[in-house]
Image (cartoon, rainbow, N blue to C red):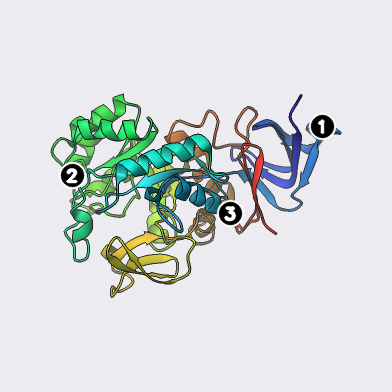
Amino acid sequence: MDSEIIAVKAHRVVTPLQDLRNAVVLVQGEKIVAVGLAHNIPVPDRAKVIDAGRKIVAPGFIDLHHHGAMGMFADGAGAVKKIGRYLAGTGTTGWLPTTAPVPGVDIMAGLEGIAVATREGTGGAESLGVHMEGPFLAPKRLPGQEVLDSALSEPSIEEFYRYVDASDGNIKIMGVAPELDGALELIGEMRRAGVVPAVAHTKGTYQQFMRAVEAGARHVTHTYNVMTGFHHRRPGVVGGALTCDQVTAELIADGYHVSPVGMDILLRCKGIERVAVITDNVSLAGLPDGEYEMFGRQIVKQDGVSRLKGSTPGQDNTMAGSEWPMNHNLRVLTDQVGVSLKDAIRMATLTPATIIHSDDHKGSIEPGKDADIVVIDEQFNVYLTMVKGRIVYQQE
């Protein structure tokens, strides 16, 4: 028996390769079967019609860097599923649960929990694999960061493959500081294993960054943040990220981690095809502002940003994470940076899907691709989220 056909009609459908007016998307089962102008796409009589009216239909957002919400991935498969359901309300239909090296957290157990949730489904945003931020990172050696520094380790190919096995082969991206001993060899092995090597949490020079690219690095973790900045005589890792076309880049576009000018420079240098909007949410996402304890540190969440208690807003080294959702970050890009709605959507859909080599079935509204769809307005408020043809969130 054929599965139900759903026709999603809207004043505007951003695929994001096209910006269609008065269009329709046909969904059957888990897949998109047709998309186009309404007068070109006949809707079967038996179809269930969802009329989005003057709102916008777009591909579901894909967040490549997300540590948690109302809890951490390391709390097991149940926590991963809970996070996935939360994300659906923000327009995110796919994400990479992201590990972080912290004392007392069993990364192996966390990877196994993600693998279980990936196989079983979350009931919300789909886990598309794993992003490992470390543990092969440079220590910050800053006040309040000593506890986290103690959880770091030197690059090890053997340790890398233990993580691959624990994740059931689902690691998509792994961050490493290129200046560490053994980093270049590890980067080459990551490429051979089908993992995207990312430059992350580094005090390296521009020259060390370029040697990492030569070894196989193809991605930059949260560009500008926790890396050597640009100086006209010492271009640093930021200089490499801005000018090297071989690497893609993440951007925390919450309006706090990077200024609108910094975002504009990154987009002018790299283009929307090489920049993926991320949230870098940690466990306080979805919780109200207030004071919390996280990994033995006192954290204050205020205005959507988490900082070490007692720190002064504006001091970059005191940020402990962003808690703004993806739809907020896209609103910042359009309102504060002047990015078009179509381009902003692309940086949250097709670009991240391409980075993790999933663009054959994710990231755009095209026939044959997964029916991951959101209904939003021009301010990116989310009204409906569909994952593989199933409605997982609908605003009451």
Residue position marked by numbered label 3 in the rendering: 89
Nearest to N terminus: mark 3 or mark 2:
3
Q: What mark, if any, has residue 153 been given in the picture?
A: 2
Q: Where the N terminus falls, by quadrant?
A: top right
Of the pair 160 and 365, the residue shown nearer to us = 160
Q: Where the C terminus falls, by quadrant?
A: bottom right
Q: Circles 1 and 2: CB distance less than 8 Å?
A: no
Give the alpha-carbon distance from disc 1 to disc 2, as whole Å: 58 Å
Residue at figure coordinates x 48%, y 69% from the top left: 288
Q: Which class describes the residues within 10 Å of circle 3: few (<14), some (14-19), or many (20+)?
A: many
- Measured as percent of width and height from the top left, residue 326 is found at 50, 53
Q: Nearer the viewer, mark 3 or mark 1?
A: 3
* Residue 243 visible in image: no
* Residue 198 visible in image: yes
Vertical position of residue 196 compared to residue 81: above or below: above
Residue at figure coordinates x 19%, y 30% from the top left: 185
Q: Kindly identify the amino acid type of the residue bearing the numbered disc 3.
A: Gly
Nearest to N terminus: mark 3 or mark 1:
1
Residue at figure coordinates x 20%, y 44% from the top left: 206
Horizontal side of residue 100 vs 207, given as left or right = right
Give the alpha-carbon distance from disc 3 to disc 2, as whole Å: 36 Å
Q: Kindly identify the amino acid type of the residue bearing the numbered disc 1.
A: Pro
Q: Kindly identify the amino acid type of the residue bearing the numbered disc 2.
A: Ser
Nearest to N terminus: mark 1 or mark 2:
1
Residue position marked by numbered label 1 in the rendering: 42
Residue at figure coordinates x 18%, y 46% from the top left: 205
Q: Secondary structure at mark 2?
A: loop
- Measured as percent of width and height from the top left, residue 365 is found at 62, 36
Q: Secondary structure at mark 3?
A: loop
Q: Secondary structure at mark 1?
A: loop
Give the alpha-carbon distance from disc 3 to disc 1, as whole Å: 30 Å
Q: Nearer the viewer, mark 1 or mark 2?
A: 2
